[in-house]
Image (cartoon, grey):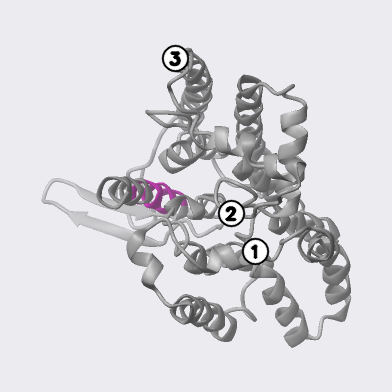
């Protein structure tokens, strides 16, 4: 195929067929892993990993202990309430609980197609297929070679995040704010977006949006993050715990001032140089990076950055940089856009995660 400069461009042909193939592979991987987990756990000595921890997370709520610590009550209250609900409908069976973990991840992944469609992403079938086989998503939310790779609490987060993405393009952003608030209440990944939104509307003197933001985003935060301070025993211990101690021995010695200092540098840097120009979607996803700067001290998990994949396929920069190779017999003009960068970054994320597992844990 020729461009205006008569240079040869390498482009994927039959994108729909390739996309359908990738979608089939992505779905098949998820179904295979569910069957694989059930088979290997016929041996009761095989660990269910984080899924068993999540299954037992809320136990201290019912014994009256209310222990806010790793493997106990380590999530915001909304996530705890959802864990109680899914444990209840699992009838006390970890196997049923595992199926719900699979089902939530499966449905959330499939729902991303409707996000791509609403954002009018070109070659939607191909991009959706690429998303479903993304190795970083599979490594962090589906696959584990030794126990079980599901993280049901992450699925709670993605449910509300994808809903907020779906309503972001609406002229009335009330639903976007509402589901953004609920997203922050399931996990703290996007919590810094709340002060960013407030400051942005303040700088722009956009009082109409400020009012909607306060009502629709502020209400779930008030109900699920702030008011529990008044009625949940020892609730403040949850936040103190995330700022002290670590699962990495060397990080235990890091001063709290260093941890907060790095967080403030990144938070203020983005606030000063970018917030006023950025749209609410960019701010939402950059807030994940801001939060990662403090959460990784507690647990060195690269998977905290997995949600950035969603944003990588929604931005519209299709020509981030160009690789131009000129041989005597052929001229190759290889353009790298946001989709390829997202997939490449995901592979890098996998390598980093594997390196951390091998050399640190």
Q: Is residue 213 left or right of residue 104?
A: right
- Packing grade of label 1 (10 A; few <14, some 14-19, many >=20) is some
Nearer to the camera, 3 or 103: 103
Going 83% across and 64% down the picture, which residue do you hit? 227
Query: Which mark, by number, is residue 271?
Result: none
Check disc 2 and report its element: helix, strand or loop: loop
Please report the bounds of the magenta region as a residue range.
Answer: 339-348
The residue under label 3 is 43
Check disc 3 and report its element: helix, strand or loop: loop
The residue under label 1 is 237
Going 25% across and 50% down the picture, which residue do you hit? 359
Residue 73: say if magenta: no
- Label 3 and label 2: CA atoms lie apart by 29 Å
The residue under label 2 is 69
Tell me if residue 261 comes above or below residue 49 in the rendering.
Answer: below
| Dominant secondary-structure state across the stretch colored magenta | helix
């Amino acid at each position: 195929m020729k461009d205006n400069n008569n240079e040869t461009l390498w482009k994927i042909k039959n994108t729909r067929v390739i996309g359908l193939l990738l979608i089939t592979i992505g779905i098949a991987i998820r179904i295979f892993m569910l069957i694989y987990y059930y088979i290997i756990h016929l041996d009761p000595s095989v660990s269910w990993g984080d899924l068993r921890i999540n299954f037992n997370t809320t136990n201290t709520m019912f014994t009256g202990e209310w222990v806010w610590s790793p493997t106990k009550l380590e999530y915001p209250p909304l996530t705890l309430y959802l864990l109680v609900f899914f444990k209840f409908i699992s009838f006390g069976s970890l196997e049923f609980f595992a199926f719900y973990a699979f089902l939530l991840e499966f449905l959330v992944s499939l729902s991303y197609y409707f996000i791509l469609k609403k954002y009018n992403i070109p070659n939607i079938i191909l991009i959706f297929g690429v998303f479903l086989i993304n190795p970083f998503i599979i490594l962090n939310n589906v696959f584990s070679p030794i126990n079980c790779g599901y993280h049901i609490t992450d699925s709670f987060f993605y449910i509300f995040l994808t809903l907020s993405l779906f309503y972001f393009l609406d002229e009335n952003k009330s639903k976007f704010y509402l589901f953004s608030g609920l997203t922050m209440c399931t996990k703290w990944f996007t919590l810094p977006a709340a002060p960013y939104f407030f400051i942005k509307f303040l700088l722009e003197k956009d009082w109409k949006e400020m009012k909607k933001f306060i009502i629709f985003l502020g209400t779930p935060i008030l109900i699920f993050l702030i008011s529990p301070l008044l009625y949940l025993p020892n609730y403040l211990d949850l936040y103190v715990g995330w700022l002290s101690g670590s699962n990495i021995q060397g990080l235990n010695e890091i001063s709290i001032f260093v941890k907060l200092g790095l967080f403030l540098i990144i938070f203020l840097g983005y606030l000063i140089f970018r917030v006023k120009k950025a749209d609410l979607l960019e701010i939402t996803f950059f807030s994940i990076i801001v939060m990662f700067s403090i959460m990784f001290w507690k647990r060195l998990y690269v998977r905290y950055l997995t949600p950035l994949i969603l944003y990588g396929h929604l931005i519209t920069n299709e020509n981030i940089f160009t690789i131009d190779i000129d041989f005597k017999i052929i001229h190759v003009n290889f353009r790298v856009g946001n989709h390829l960068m997202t997939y490449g970054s995901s592979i890098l994320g996998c390598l980093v995660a594997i390196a951390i597992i091998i050399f640190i844990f």
